[in-house]
Image (cartoon, helix red, strand yellow):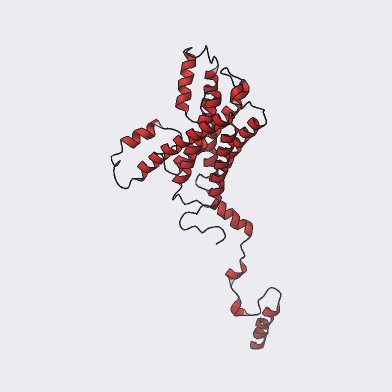
Amino acid sequence: MEDSVQSSIDLKPSQPGYPTDLESFSPAATIVERPESRLRRHFASKVNYHHTDYVLLLCWFTTGVLDSTIFNAYRTFVSMQTGNTMFLGLGASNYTTTTRPYGWAKSLTSLICFVMGTLFFFRLAQYLQPSRRSTLALSFIIQAGIILLCAVLVQTGAVEGRLEYIGEDIDWVHTVPIALLSFQAPGQVWLSRELNFAEVSTVVVSTMLYDFGSDPALFDRRNDKRNRRFFGFCCLLVGAIVGGWVTKQSGHITIPMWVAGCIKLGIAGAWVVWPAERGVRWWGQ
């Protein structure tokens, strides 16, 4: 009886699939993680929100660049919807009908597309889970793609981008870049809400300045919210100066669009390598 048991045990190591050294056998050693599963886990991980406010400062800068550029060319905004609301009201009151009879239509187009973009980016984030690395990267890839598409349309002449040939009256093809750029603008506003940095929405200045001045801790040595508001305003102002100056010097609106699109494409790339939240390992570790 003992010989039969011993022989059955001795046969197992010689069978295919059994290790010859029983001490080296480990269930964990037989589990090999596939590269695609590691990649999937990396993009499904949640990013660490530490220092992500710097990304919002770049968004403020792009807002200044695009709004100053588009206003120079088409006399409307794509992010600052307060100004567009005023232009819409002036159009309804017949105040600008002599010089810009359809100027209000550009502002109305921007307002509608901004709301549509808000619905799109919010629903997209809810569907894909907001704080995932893949969601953040995809959001900025879409924004960058839209801006770069507008740059291509202007660069190729499909849409007039030379300031000397853009008149005060409306050319309906001008509403194409206005609509597209207004549609992508809420993507960065959604980001400020997702990152819990509501004090820097990347588009609204009046409320931010009020919150800055009414902050009880305004003169404290350390005040992160005050600092974000101050530098957000500075980045917006610098972006507006850069966009306006480049547009004036070149006589064309293409360069600022390429700059803004590349910045947002760079942000999308940054999300790919951004550190994961605590307790989640980096990709490749």
State which quadrant residue 225 falls in: top left
Which residue appears at 65% of the width and 31% of the height? 153
State which quadrant residue 166 falls in: top right
Q: Residue 42: where, in percent of width, then height?
A: 56, 54
Q: Residue 94: where, in percent of width, then height?
A: 48, 12
Viewer-proximal residue, 16 or 234?
A: 234
| Quarter that holds the N terminus | bottom right
Q: Residue 195: where, in percent of width, then height?
A: 45, 44
Which residue appears at 56% of the width and 45% of the height? 266
173 vs 122, left or right, is right
Number of marks in the rendered image: 0
| Quarter that holds the C terminus | bottom right
Is 263 located above or below residue 275 in the figure? above
197 vs 9, left or right, is left
Report whether residue 92 is seen.
yes
Report whether residue 137 is seen.
no
Viewer-proximal residue, 46 or 234?
A: 234
Viewer-proximal residue, 281 or 144?
A: 144
Which residue appears at 60% of the width and 70% of the height? 29
Q: Residue 88: where, in percent of width, then height?
A: 49, 19
Which residue appears at 57% of the width and 27% of the height? 178
